[in-house]
Image (cartoon, rainbow, N blue to C red):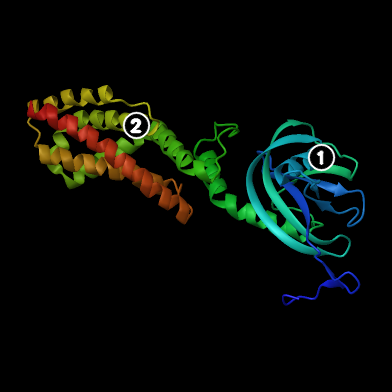
Amino acid sequence: MEGKIRDFCMQCSQVFYENPLPVASSIVVNEDREVLLVKRAKDPYKGMWCLPIGFAETGEEMKDAALRELREEAGVDGEIVRLIDVDTVDNYFYGSLAIVTYEVRVTGGTPEPGDDAEETRFFPLHELPPLAWSSNEKAMRIYLELYRDTWAMMDSYRQLFPEVQSLEGVSPGPQEQKTFLSNILVKLIEMNADEITREWASEVRSSIPALSVHMDFLSEVNRKVLRSVREGLQGRADSLGYIKFKDTGKDIRRLGIAFPFVLNALALSRKRIWMHVVQKKILSSPLEIYITLELNNRIIFLYDRVIYHISAGFVE
């Protein structure tokens, strides 16, 4: 029937539709990038490790089932972060199963085995034991690919700023990656403003020799610009913060500096930020580069605000 072999009762003319049983599982990963697994205490797959997993009850939503099973099997409470995978498998013990896997963030409790588990333990993501369910293996592959770029950015952050002991609360999901990379740029500018300015001054001297005699003044201007860009990326800058650049424009005119040279120098200043990012090897994936292009649009806007007020001061 309908291209499939189905069970059929010849006496009552009823078709028996064998539908998959709904199963919910959870991926719980800590800040050390270890995933919570439970060792099964019962068949099937007794003694093997798996994600916290179990059947949904009648009338129970799959999200609620995942959180209940996590609490019953592993002893921790959690909240759903996102859906990771839905997989249909045929199991020798239970028959057809529809396994729904969620990413879950722990909100309370201490990992300890429940009635259906012998043991609970966190395993490094790249050192997992064989998992009992093929759907768990598949979901973990999807999860690792989902977070690959995020972790690359976090590793860059740790490498650049080793004094930051914990990234708890900073760990981004896909929607926060742009903000996270923006925060890296803010930190980079904050800690390396003098170095960026020295690199910029060297480039200005070689490409715009006429500005060489004013480099002390212009270097201080560049530090002010970098500070404003940093505040702009943090969302802390307002229009009043840029009005101060009117005085900079007046000083530029007073010193007799040709304004086209100033515009060229500011373009080199913006370029130097990204050159510094490249030198620090922050960008490690196409996704990061794509996000960076969006951030560059924000930085262009911030530089435009600076240029506007410098120009207004110069004209006055």
Report x, y in % for residue 258.
8, 37
Residue type pointed to by label 1: Ala
Calculate the distance from the C-alpha at mark 2 to the C-alpha at mark 1: 44 Å
Residue 170 lies left or right of residue 30; in this view the side is left
Report x, y in % for residue 117.
88, 45
Q: Which residue is mark 2?
A: 232
**At 75% across and 48% down in the image, what residue appears?**
25
Name the front one of labels 2 and 1: 1
**Looking at the image, is 68 positioned above or below residue 99?**
above
User: On the rendered image, what quadrant is the N terminus found in?
Assistant: bottom right
Q: Which residue is mark 1?
A: 74
- Residue 248 is labelled as none
Q: Earlier in the sequence, mark 2 or mark 1?
A: 1
**At 26% across and 37% down in the image, what residue appears?**
303
Report x, y in % for residue 176.
50, 41
SS state under label 2: helix
Residue 252, visible in the rendered structure? no
